[in-house]
Image (spheres, grey):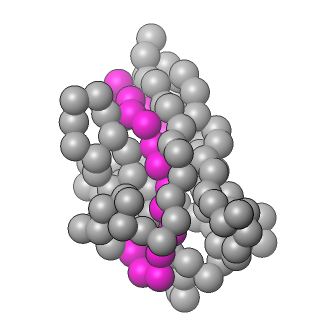
Amino acid sequence: QMQLAESGGGLVQPGGSLRLSCAASGFTLEKYAVGWFRQAPGKSREGVACIESDDDMTYIARSVKGRFIISRADAKTTVTLFMNNLKPEDTAVYYCAADRLCSWTRNLEDHEYWGQGAQVTVSS
């Protein structure tokens, strides 16, 4: 069965850091662009970061620029979202999704694959 799974969420204090990982089963993640999206309670889902498949070019949303980094790891079998200097407004369910190209306008469910999400809570 081909699917994505996020891991690494949890509770962190403001100013802290977390690392989210996205891993694929049943297919090779290296061949796909992978994006991270998040949805906070009562808010629309937003894209926060994406990494292309061919040249690993990355895109970071303005709301998290300078704090979040996306990269491939483990011989490109996973994609990691490094989240630093976390703020309470970063609290959300974070999803990873894979498709041929990065896109800020593609809905999560319109990606070829997407995960079930990981909760990130930033609170003191």
Give the x, y percent position of residue 16. 52, 28
Q: Residue at x 70, y 76 (%)?
A: 28
Front residue of this view, candidates 120 and 62:
120
Residue 89 seen = yes
Residue 56 seen = no
Give the x, y percent position of residue 32. 56, 78
* Quarter placement of the C terminus: top left
Q: Which residues make up the magenta segment?
A: 82-102
Give the x, y percent position of residue 2. 66, 66
Q: Is residue 98 magenta?
A: yes
Name the side, left or right, on which 6 lies relative to 39: right
Name the side, left or right, on which 95 lies relative to 90: right
Q: Residue at x 22, y 29 (%)?
A: 42
Q: Residue at x 47, y 49 (%)?
A: 95
Picture layout, residue 85 above or below residue 35: above
Q: Residue furthest front?
A: 1
Picture layout, residue 40 above or below residue 114: above
Q: How many numbered marks have been drawn onto this rendered protein structure?
A: 0
